[in-house]
Amino acid sequence: MGKRTVGDVELEVHEEGNGDPALLLLHGFTGSSLDWTDVTGDLARNRRVVAYDQRGHGDSTNTGDPASYTIGQLTTDLGSVVDQLGLAPFDLLGHSMGGIVAMQYAVAHPEKLRSLILMDTFAEPTGGIPASWIDYVVGVARENGMEGVAEMFLSYIDQAPNAGDLTPERREELASRIRYKLTHMDVEALDQLGRGLGTFDALLDGVAGLRMPVTVIVGEKDSGLREPAEVLAKAIPDAVLEVIPAAGHSPQEDNAPSWLAAVRGHLGRAEAQPKA
C-alpha cells in the first residue's frame, strides 16, 4: 500500500486480503512488517490484514530525534493509522513492544477494538531489556553502525528452538530479514525504545478492566516471557493462554502452523461473541 503520513513521519503500511473486521499486526522492538511474511498470506485468505513498520523501523521514517521515540508516541501513531484506514472495530495483535503499544491503545480506546491478541509481551516494565544490554548494543551501533548490530543478531538464528531443523535456504531467508530490519533501523529508536521497555507505566490494572475477547500467545521456549504471559492471562477476564510448542520469541516464524491455529481459534471466539 505504501506510505501513510502520521504527524511528521511517514509509516510504511501493507494491506492484504478483504473482509471486516480487519486484523492489524503490530511488530516489536527491532522488528518490521517482515516479521509477518510467513503468515499474512494464510490469514488474508478470508480477511483484511494490515501491518505497518513503526517509526524508526523498517521502511518508515527514521527521525534521528531521540525525543520522538517513546512508547506513548508509538501508541499515538497506532491510533492515527487506525483512523486513517477506517479500521474500527478491528482485531489487534501486538508482539513484544507492539504488545505494550496494543495494551496502551486497548485501555484508552476499547470501543474501537473487537478483540485483542497479546504475543510474547509483558504488562509491567520489570519484563524489559536490561539497561546494560541496551548500553552495549547501542555502543556497537554508534561505533560500527547498525550493520554491526545486524551481525550480532544473526547469531540468534542458531540459538532458536528449531535451529537444528532449519534448511540452509530457510536460515538465509531469516538472516536476510534480520539484516534488512537492523540496517534500516534508526539507532536513536534502538536506544530510546530499548530503554522505554523498562520504564513505561505498568498496564496490568488497566488491562484487567478489558471486556473483549483476549488471547495471550507465548512461545514455549521464550523463557523470560512465559511467566509474564501467565500473569497477563490471569489478570484479564476470560483471557485464553496459548503456548506455542517448539517456538521462542517469534512463534509465527518458529512454528507457523501452531501459531496460525491459535490465532484462528481466537478469531473464531471473537466472531462468536454476541454483537453489541
Image: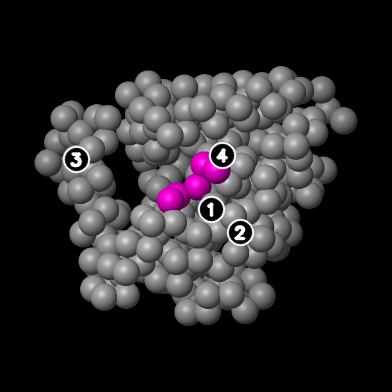
Q: Are marks 4 and 2 in contact (CB under 8 Å)?
A: no
Q: Are marks 3 and 4 in contact (CB under 8 Å)?
A: no
Disc 1 marks which amino acid? Answer: Leu
Disc 3 marks which amino acid? Answer: Asp
Q: Residue 89 at x, y = what percent? A: 75, 43
Q: Nearer the viewer, residue 126 or 18?
A: 126
If you read the primary sequence from the N terminus, does the residue marked by circle 4 or circle 2 appear first? 2
Q: CA distance from mark 4 to mark 2?
A: 13 Å
Q: Which residue is mark 3?
A: 158
Q: Residue at x 75, y 37 (%)?
A: 205
Q: Which residue is mark 1?
A: 197
If you read the primary sequence from the N terminus, does the residue marked by circle 2 or circle 1 appear first? 2
Q: CA distance from mark 3 to mark 4?
A: 25 Å
Is residue 7 shown to the viewer in this render? yes
Q: Which residue is mark 4?
A: 122
Q: Secondary structure at mark 4?
A: loop
Q: Which residue is mark 2?
A: 71
Quadrant of the image containing the C terminus: top right
Q: Residue at x 43, y 45 (%)?
A: 36
Image quadrant where residue 7 sits: bottom right
Q: Is residue 163 above or below residue 194?
A: above
Is residue 32 shown to the viewer in this render? no
Disc 2 marks which amino acid? Answer: Ile
Q: Secondary structure at mark 1?
A: loop
Q: CA distance from mark 1 to mark 3?
A: 25 Å
If you read the primary sequence from the N terminus, does the residue marked by circle 1 or circle 3 appear first? 3
Tell which residue pokes out farthest to the front in this image: 132
If you read the primary sequence from the N terminus, does the residue marked by circle 3 or circle 4 appear first? 4
